Image (spheres, rainbow, N blue to C red):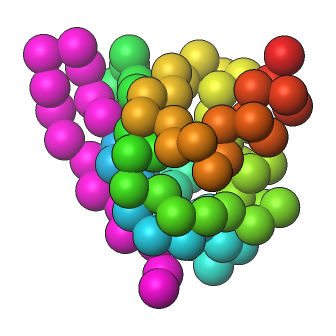
Amino acid sequence: MACGIRIAQESEGWTVHLAGRLTATEVDELFRVCEDASRPLRIDLTDLLSLDATGFGAIQQLVASGARLVGVPPSVRNNIDHDLQ
């Protein structure tokens, strides 16, 4: 299952919703969507099933540039918490 990328404007700003498996194939689209969105930017990982090393690197880069993660599933929380500290 490929990663679905959907963006929505909400009261807190823009939220990028990811669903499925984030792999290198979808990273360019993720960056494009995030670049086009106004700040503040949230990335909702509620429906993310998995991510490969390239997808993980993209998430790290977006967080480093100010994006806030929400809905981080337990299956990826430990890696994200460990590597983003």
**Residue 49 x/y as whole percent:** 52, 64
Say above or below: 19 vs 12. below
Look at 70% across and 72% down and name the residue there. Answer: 24
Chain part drawn in magenta = 1-15
Say above or below: 25 vs 46. below
Say above or below: 4 vs 12. below
Question: On the rendered structure, is 20 left or right of 84?
Answer: left
Magenta span dominant secondary structure = strand
Instruction: Examine the rendering and report whether any part of residue 61 can be seen.
Output: no
* The C terminus: image quadrant: top right
In-front residue for pair 72/4: 72
Look at 66% across and 47% down and name the residue there. Answer: 76
Q: How many labels does the image show?
A: 0
**Residue 50 x/y as whole percent:** 61, 64
Look at 51% across and 28% down and name the residue there. Answer: 69
Instruction: Examine the rendering and report whether any part of residue 71 can be seen.
Output: yes
Question: On the rendered structure, is 13 left or right of 82?
Answer: left
Question: On the rendered structure, is 38 left or right of 85?
Answer: left
Say above or below: 66 vs 35. above
Magenta stretch encompasses residue 36: no
**Residue 39 x/y as whole percent:** 38, 19
Most extreme residue toward the bottom, as rendered? 1
Residue 63 found in image quarter = top right
In-front residue for pair 73/16: 73
Question: On the rendered structure, is 51 left or right of 79?
Answer: left
